[in-house]
């Protein structure tokens, strides 16, 4: 009787899962071009040698892709999902002044489809290689009866480190400091519950040739951070603008100092089509409004900070009002 019951018969193929680990080996190795794990990949936990840091402080973050994942699956954009997953956590690490060192993923599926999972991981690996962060491990969980076929659960976790004296301290923000906005490539990976509702109520709103750009991955801002370091600018704070739009994300940094911000109307590609259904006040507190990254520097360094990346603008000033005011110029 006991022979009638096997793990594979219950829907979990551990041999297929083990084969997948081997298949993604080359993708993972791409992420170790400049940094390497201390011990071999594939142990029960990953280790990284921090001895190059004099006063290391560990910084961590975790996030997902949210309901954007539904549309990415519908439009077969698995690589973008992998990139979104990395950027949502890596960008958060960068705001601290830290270096993203290790990334781990969690993928939950009803049954293992090696081709699809490898495409997800290829997107992760591409972004991780770009910012010199190691794909240190992860978990692919096969859960028949829990995760429906065709659906994917996706989470990411990043571990970074910073020299203690170089940690960015937002308490140093002062009245008169300038806010520099750096462009996003789209809605990134927040606000998609509202976006999906608008699209569902307006079939055909997004045309076939617009979907790829509309679903553009969350931008990595490691190049901006590298530029700020190269110019040795006095960065008071950095914000990665995701859920909560501009006001909430900046209020975390500004406390009772407040800021006055004016931004141009965001009408890139099909973004404007969606925003036409949303009142400005609602859009401002939901989306990044075209500015996925904001840096706060002293006023006399604002031009240098904006010169780091094409499209960057001085969008506001710390004004001591106690509130973050955001207006859209027409």
Image (cartoon, rainbow, N blue to C red):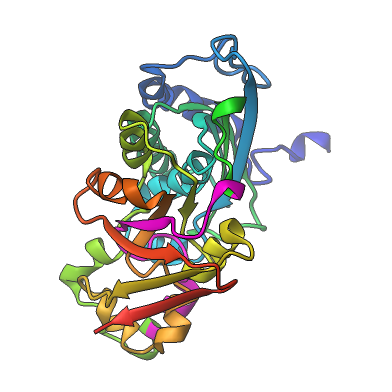
Residue 163 visible in the shown view: no
Q: State which quarter of the image contains the C terminus.
A: bottom left
Determine whether, in the image, residue 303 is placed left or right of residue 295. left
Tell me residue 89's x, y (percent).
52, 45
Above/below status of 266 relative to 61: below
Q: Say which quarter of the image contains residue 206.
A: bottom left
- Residue 257: quarter of image: bottom right
* Viewer-side residue, 270 vs 278: 278
Q: Residue at position x 64%, y 27% from top?
A: 57
For the question of whether residue 291 can be seen, the reply is: yes
Q: Residue furthest right?
A: 1
Residue 176 within the magenta-colored segment of the rendering: yes
The magenta segment is: 171-198
Residue at horizontal 64 percent and vertical 52 percent from the top: 144
| In-front residue for pair 195/164 | 164
- Residue 196 on image: x %, y %: 43, 77
Residue 84 is a magenta residue: no
Q: Nearer the viewer, residue 146 or 138?
A: 138
Horizontal side, residue 178 vs residue 59: left or right: left
**Considering the image in quadrants, where does the N terminus appear?**
top right
Q: Total label count?
A: 0
């Amino acid at each position: 009787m006991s022979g009638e019951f096997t793990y594979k018969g219950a829907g979990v193929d551990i041999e297929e899962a083990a084969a997948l680990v081997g298949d993604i080996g080359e993708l993972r190795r791409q992420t170790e071009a400049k940094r390497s794990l201390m011990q071999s990949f594939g142990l029960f936990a990953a280790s990284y040698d921090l001895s190059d840091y004099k006063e290391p402080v560990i910084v961590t973050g975790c996030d997902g892709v949210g309901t954007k994942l539904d549309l990415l699956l519908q439009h077969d954009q698995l690589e973008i999902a992998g990139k979104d997953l990395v950027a949502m956590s890596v960008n958060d690490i960068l705001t601290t002044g830290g270096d993203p060192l290790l990334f781990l993923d969690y993928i939950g599926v009803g049954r293992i489809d090696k081709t699809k999972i490898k495409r997800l991981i290829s997107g992760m690996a591409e972004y991780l290689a770009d910012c010199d962060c190691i794909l240190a491990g992860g978990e692919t969980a096969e859960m028949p009866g829990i995760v429906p076929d065709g659906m994917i659960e996706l989470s990411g976790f990043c571990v970074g480190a910073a020299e203690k004296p170089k940690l960015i301290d937002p308490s140093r923000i002062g009245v008169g400091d300038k806010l520099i906005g750096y462009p996003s490539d789209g809605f990134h990976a927040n606000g998609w519950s509202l976006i999906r509702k608008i699209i569902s109520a307006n079939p055909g709103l997004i045309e076939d040739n617009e979907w790829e750009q509309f679903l553009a991955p969350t931008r990595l801002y490691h190049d901006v951070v590298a530029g700020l370091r190269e110019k040795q600018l006095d960065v008071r704070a950095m914000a990665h603008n995701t859920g909560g739009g501009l006001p909430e994300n900046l209020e975390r940094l500004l406390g009772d100092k407040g800021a006055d911000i004016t931004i141009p109307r965001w009408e890139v590609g099909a973004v404007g089509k969606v925003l036409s259904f949303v009142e400005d006040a609602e859009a401002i507190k939901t989306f990044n409004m075209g500015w996925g990254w904001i840096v706060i520097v002293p006023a006399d360094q604002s031009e240098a900070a904006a010169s780091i990346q094409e499209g960057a603008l001085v969008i506001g000033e710390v004004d001591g009002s106690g509130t973050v005011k955001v207006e859209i110029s027409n």
